[in-house]
Amino acid sequence: MQIIIIGAGVIGSAIARELSRYNIDIILIEKEPDVADGTSKANSGIIHAGYNADANTLKGSMNVKSNPIYDQLCEDLKVPFKRNGSLVVGFKDEDLKKLKAKKSNGEKNGIKGLEILNREELLAKEPNINKNAKYALYAPSAGIISPYELTIGYADNAVRNGVEVLLNTKVTDLIIENDKVKGVVTNRGNFNADLVINSAGLYSDKIAKMAGDNFEITPRKGEYHLFDKVHGDLVSNTLFPMPTEKSKGILVLPTVHGNLLIGPNANTIDDKDDFSTTSDGLEEVFRGAKKLVPNVPQDGIITSFSGLRASLPSNDFHIDFSKNKKALINLVGIQSPGLSSAPAIADKVAEMVNHYFKINNKKLKLKDDFIETNPSYPHYHRYEEENEVEKWQQIVDENEDYGEVICRCEHVSKGEIIDAIHRPIPATTVDAIKRRTRASSGRCQAGFCGPRILNILSNQLDIDPLEVTKKGKDSKILKAKSKELILKKIKEENNVGDKK
């Protein structure tokens, strides 16, 4: 039996890992040069407590089921995760009624520890919060995570358990015979399957339409500012304003890596590949953040970016079999809290897959040798944070590559970058290295380490430096070798002299 999963974001990768528990052949297909290269690379990185959505919706039920799983999951996958808690902040007396309603909904969903804080209690938790704030809903079970590291952790573990991952592979059509999906057509050939799972994120509606299922995803762009770590302790909890019908609002939060993050706004766009930022949008983010924390710094921004969410008119997840063709499961509109809901979504899809094969007189068998955990790769900053630098010296004594610092801002060694290149999902671009090691994520944004990372990629992949890319496709970093340019210029000057 063979299953194809389209899309290697956090949802597709989570499904691949969950299904790899069974004795089946699985292919995970991704059109980009790395996993987590779409929505999963650019969002707030929040594991929501689950008080927002109704438990009768997929959003509500999947979020509530998933939240408690994250501690053990992240320990198994070796992904950084912290339960820092969240605060929804109210400034008006009428906000108190709304916060109490959220608390009541959360308690109906089974969430424990929810509290309504008054001004004094709120200021005690967050001294830098706007002094005009009157109330807040506190959710201690909310957390922060690196969304792309979670996706990579899922995908790496899936590969360790036998999943084949095909990157740079774009699905252009479905193979359909007798009203049944039998595989996919890609730019790298055709692949047959007994079942296809459509988890293509922003493009899941396009894949669904290949089977006659009618969905219309509306991309919603959110822009962000990321600050240097010197500002990372401005807040300790994730701060939400009162939500609107369109979004949860512009947030202020620490990242799991110790930076400060503000955003996102929410603007509907047409282009699913438009990850640009705008001056107006980024100014909107600043204004929104300052309503919560007035002393959000004007300086200290190390990068600004945007992410896209896949929004459906129903404003809920769609997870179901195709209405028109057999052997196709569609996952459409998996926006926030999609990241928070990933474990439960993967479990639900695994149940659907088991049921599908059962009614077709086939039974899936669990493996006896499933590998639950990922290995722990050496990262200097973790030893540094835990005051165990002397243990790092032991690692350096065994392999001197770990003693050569490549990224000064994030304290990343050559050995860590080489590890990233040779992981189950290999890092073959500069951005892929960044997602696995944080090299080039600091205040200089690759100003110092960029050329060094390029050389390591060139050497390890045995490719010309001119072929190294930032993010694959048409993003080559170098145009030509300086020596060749000089010789070309001399030749051109000589030719001009000869003509004279």
Image (tube, rainbow, N blue to C red):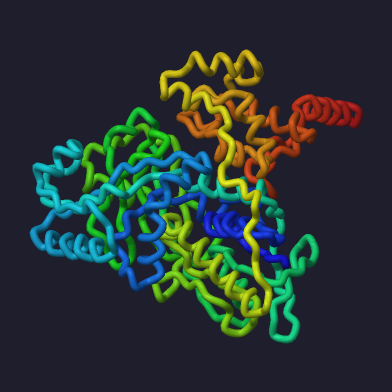
Tell me the residue at 63%/25% (across/down).
415
Which residue is the extreme one toward the right? 498
Which residue is the extreme one toward the front? 368
Tell me the residue at 43%/59% (across/down).
341
The answer to whether residue 357 is left or right of residue 100 is: right
Instruction: Say which quarter of the image contains residue 299.
Output: top left
Query: Quick one: 104 or 249, which is closer to the camera?
Result: 104
Tell me the residue at 68%/66% (across/down).
3
The answer to whether residue 49 is left or right of residue 436 is: left
Question: Which quarter of the figure is the C terminus placed in?
Answer: top right
Let me know if residue 287 appears in the view. no
Where residue 382 appears, x then y in whole percent?
A: 47, 27
Where residue 55 appears, x then y in whole percent?
A: 33, 69
Instruction: Say which quarter of the image contains residue 412.
Output: top right
Q: Is residue 136 above or below residue 182?
A: above
Tell me the residue at 73%/67% (across/down).
1
Where residue 490 appears, x then y in whole percent?
A: 83, 25
Where residue 339 appears, x then y in whole percent?
A: 45, 55
The answer to whether residue 136 is left or right of residue 370 is: left
- The total number of labels drawn is 0
Query: Quick one: 65 or 212, which is closer to the camera?
Result: 65
Let me know if residue 202 appears in the view. yes
Q: Is residue 50 above or below residue 490?
A: below
Query: Quick one: 291 or 154, which is closer to the camera?
Result: 154
